[in-house]
Amino acid sequence: MNQEKSIIQARATTPRAAAIAGILFSLLLIASLVLVRISVPANPQDAGAWLSGGWKNVDLALNLLPFAGIAFLWFIGVVRDRLGQNEDRFFATVFLGSGLLFLAMLFTSAGIAGGIISLYGATPGMLIDSGIYNFGRTVTYEIMNVYTMKMAGVFMITTCTLSLRTGIFPRWMAFLGLVLALFLLLSTGSFYWAPLVFPLWVLMISVYILLVNLRRFEGEPAASHPQ
């Protein structure tokens, strides 16, 4: 009897953990992206004049990213645990692979940006004149706005496909996620604020999962959605 109770409590805790991790990831990544985008010009070929007044905002954003990455890893882990035996091997591989590649490229772009900030603090004139800034700025822009967002789009597609098969969140959220994923895949970095789509989508499904789980925990009937 105690073992059965423990199993039930574990099943209730897992989606709550996923939801909380997803919410933390979303809020931290949104804060980081907003800080960067209000401080750094959209043009990757800018001259670097923003560094004199905006480097502190970018430095704060870069310090938030590792915590966002930890929360995202937790989110991936508990979602996979929640799927359990319903997890399709093909989609599970793409789900995990795209999530890890997203994090790897996110951290790579953050590392390059952090290097630029550190060099500017040490030798501001040399950084601009040597061409290191232009190279680092362009590489960071390409990795973050093109490749990282493509992996985010693939992650969204696989997550939505798994949801359509298992019903972990409503079908309309899955279809909306597929549309937003296609937007990320086809945007080619031309929309400066496009990266916000991914954390906002994770925030939406995480809040939904948390609310549904809280209703179940309180003994209320969970909201049903069509399969």
Image (cartoon, rainbow, N blue to C red):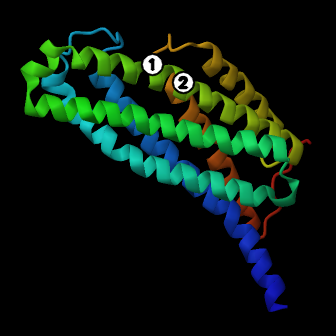
Q: Report crowding for label 2: few under 14, some 14 to 19, many 20 or more residues within 10 A (C-alpha).
A: some
- Please report the residue visible at 50 percent of the width from the left and 47 percent of the height from the top: 25
* CB contact under 8 Å: marks 1 and 2: yes
- Please report the residue visible at 11 percent of the width from the left and 33 percent of the height from the top: 121
Q: Quadrant of residue 21?
A: bottom right
Is 89 above or below relative to 210? above
Does residue 173 appear anywhere in the picture?
no
Which comes before the other along the chain, label 1 or label 2?
1
Question: What is the number of callouts on the image?
Answer: 2
Q: Residue furthest bottom?
A: 1
Q: Report crowding for label 1: few under 14, some 14 to 19, many 20 or more residues within 10 A (C-alpha).
A: some
In the picture provided, is 70 more to the left or to the right than 224? left
> Which of 174/222 is in front?
174
> Which of 71/175 is in front?
71
Q: Amino acid at mark 1?
A: Glu
Q: Position of residue 175 (x, y in %)?
A: 78, 29
Q: Position of residue 187 (x, y in %)?
A: 58, 13
In the picture provided, is 68 more to the left or to the right than 216? left
User: Which residue is identified by label 2?
Assistant: 147
> Which of 192/94 is in front?
94
Q: Quadrant of residue 31?
A: top left
In the picture provided, is 122 more to the left or to the right than 13? left
- Please report the residue visible at 27 percent of the width from the left and 14 percent of the height from the top: 134
Q: Quadrant of residue 170?
A: top right
User: Which residue is identified by label 1?
Assistant: 142
In the picture provided, is 170 more to the left or to the right than 197? right
